[in-house]
Amino acid sequence: MSLAHPSFEAPGWRWLKARVWGLEHAFERARAAGKAEDDTRIRIFFVLTLFTIAFVVLAVGATRAALFSDAGRGGGYVGAVGAARADLVDRNGAMLAADLLHYGLYVDPREIWDADEVRRALRAALPDINRQRLEKVLRGERRGFVIAGLTPEQRARVHALGLPGVSFEPEERRVYPLGRTAAHLIGFADTGGVGLAGAERALNDTIRAGAPGKAAVPLSIDLRVQAALEDELYKAAAEFQPRGAVGVVTNVHTGEILGLASYPTYDPNQVAKASDDAKLNRAAASIYEMGSTFKAFTVAIGLDTGVATPSSTFDARQPFQLGYRTIKDYHAARKILTLVEVFQHSSNIGTAKLAESIGGERLSKYFADLGLTRPAKVELMESARPLTPRKWDMDAVASTSFGHGMNVSPLAVTSAMGALLNGGYLVPLTIKKLEPGQRPQGQRAVSEQTSLQMLQIMRANVIGGSGKSANAPGLSVGGKTGTGEKYDPAIRGYSTKRQVSSFAAVFPTSGPVEADRYFVLILLDEPHGTAKTYGNSTGGWVAAPAAGRVIDRIAPFLHVKREPDLIKVVGEGSIAAAPLGDGH
């Protein structure tokens, strides 16, 4: 029988109805007997009974909530509902971001008898206080907010002044104890506890699911690697005064981003003071014509399709005429080059001839398989969409083969390079720490044989090619320089004075394909040559040395051992050696 049937009533409900009807009959009997005072007493008793029952229920509920609620457990305080965020740490457990208890300061002018004293005392204790806001509150007629984000120490300092009318209210605040370090990767959150940039935004649901005091969310970066990367990138920026700069370090097998730096940078603790330019994550959100670093992709595609072998030759004695275009080399070798020499000399002529043999259909398909025709796969929401040719005719094929006519993000290049160096798989980048030994299986982009050949070719380029200045003693460094020219509206064309100079490095190139291996990218946007570089600002002069210094510093943290034989063969002085050829 349905519980909603009129004939069904729970015993408790029948008892309550009987008592209510009993009271009503008592009222009627009192009126019938002419005893109005009894009627009034009964009604008063009934109302008092209802109030008593309600009070007992509320008291029991409050006691139960106080004794058995989880609020406040673990963190020692209760955050605003929905605002609490778990700590962020690096892959070794070092603190990157946390919720800490701060205080807002309020002033009630109605309780103040000497406004000048309160004004002087607060200005002295809190030099950063907004004077206009303080003045407005002091001249007002009600309690008003003055300043937020006071630390417990600042609160204690103001409290010790004993100022009348001054009070505090606790508030949660997201803090970044390392300031500018890894700012673009970590990102920041608003006062309501919502991530707005970087990992704070990308992993927002995961971070908000954890409360203060519970398990922290580990990111992929290693603070030791990050510190070395930032230091060398900022030194290069100080020396060559670029418009912007990027540094990235990844594990090519896992896709983990071990370090990411973007210049200029900002302090996430003071986001309101940072410009949009400083907050821009150039590694993910900016796209560039990468120049000759793309030759690594073209050479790999030539090898993978069987169009060429390392010993295949290309005539670079004369400029290559392709339709209405004449393709020249920056510093012409003017000789017949093997494929390896095309790579070492960064020959546009040789690369364009190779691309012509590959063809537009196959070249564009490989670019897609390498992830270069879409935003880089990574959790960062800032990952930008590339600009690719609308039509893959021979002009587009020749241009893209040496990194022109196609704009991609540094992270897209990083991901694609990983596929050339890890055995041939396109593995998504990640800012999350993976479990030890975990290696995601990506989509195959090139064969394992092609990957091993590219490791050898990139190593040859550092030993005796345009990447010489990136060598680090004993670490078997390989790499490729890149210099892309930017369009200049003033001359309505590409300008050699506005360049994007980069170096894409890998280490160690030795060992089996499954050996631990790391990728380093250094990019400077519109650098300026110096007397030390003889006025040159190409990748081999401004980016390769910085990449070599980064590798030299981070190798111990990544447990990459130096090979004594390589130190003897190449020589320690090669880190500072001038690049061969054009340095492109």
Image: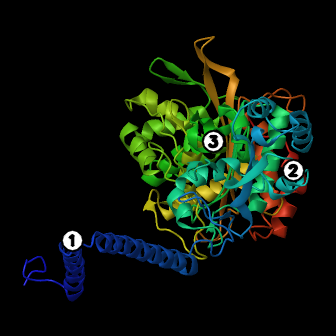
Residue 198 placed where, x, y %? 60, 50
Crowding at dot 3, Cα within 10 Å, few <14 / some 14-19 / many 20+, comes out as many
Q: Secondary structure at mark 1?
A: helix
Front residue (pair 4, 460): 4
Residue 244: percent from left, percent from top? 71, 34
- 34 versus 485 height, above or below: below
Nearer the observer, 549 or 312: 549
> For the C terminus, which image quadrant?
top right
From mark 3 to mark 2, how far is it between C-alphas?
39 Å
* Badge 1 amino acid: Arg
Q: Which of the labelled discs sits on residue 281, or is there none?
A: 3
Separation (CA) of disc 3 from disc 1: 84 Å
Q: The residue tagged with tag 3: helix, strand or loop?
A: loop
Q: Relative to the observer, which residue lies in front, 324 or 85?
A: 85
Q: Residue at x 50, y 48 (%)?
A: 376
Say if mark 2 contacts mark 1, CB within 8 Å.
no
Q: Which residue is mark 2?
A: 158
Q: Nearer the viewer, mark 3 or mark 2?
A: 2
Q: Earlier in the sequence, mark 2 or mark 1?
A: 1
